[in-house]
Image: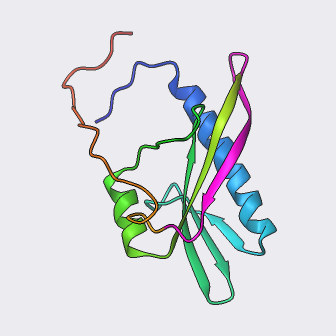
Amino acid sequence: MEVSCDAGDAKQVLIEELAVKKAVKYFRNLGYAVRNVGNKKSYDLECRKGNINIHVEVKGTTTGGESIILTPNEVANAKGHRSALFVLHSIKKRGRSGVKGGMRFVLNPWRIKAHGELIPSLYRYVVSETCPR
């Protein structure tokens, strides 16, 4: 069970949606057939062109994108499949309910061990109570 009391979660969803939208456009412009599989798989996009199949991990952030958070499943997927990393960074928050802009950084192919350093940085804590309403 995950409990969140952070109103910023809605903004993060918008950031992620913007990043996925721009990643889809980027890979389609390169001639790939693109499927959004983020709600079913541990990666976000499946991109096919001929006999090439790429699993794309998409990250969106308001930071400069120097580091990103990856789940264990995202790491395992990147290690086990032909993968690409699409980061939309420097996204601007617009008002109370919007986001815009961003600059892209793409590693394709993404060789997770060669292109960066994995640093353990998170613990998951499951609370037994819900947030006060």
Question: Camera-side residue: 71 or 4?
Answer: 71
Residue 130 screen position, x and y as percent: 29, 20
| Image quadrant in which the C terminus is located | top left
Magenta-colored stretch includes residue 106: yes
Q: In the current view of this chain or complex, which residue is farthest to the right?
A: 29
- Residue at the spot 73% in from the left edge and 16% down from the top edge: 95
Residue 82 screen position, x and y as percent: 49, 76
* Quadrant hosting residue 61: top right
Magenta-colored stretch includes residue 121: no
Q: Is residue 4 above or below residue 75?
A: above
Name the side, left or right, on which 115 lies relative to 56: left
Q: In the current view of this chain or complex, which residue is farthest to the left?
A: 128
Q: Is residue 74 above or below residue 100?
A: below
Residue 39 screen position, x and y as percent: 51, 54
| Image quadrant in which the N terminus is located | top left
Residue 85 screen position, x and y as percent: 55, 59
- Residue at the spot 71% in from the left edge and 50% down from the top edge: 21
Q: In the current view of this chain or complex, which residue is farthest to the top?
A: 133
Which residues fall within the magenta stretch? 94-110
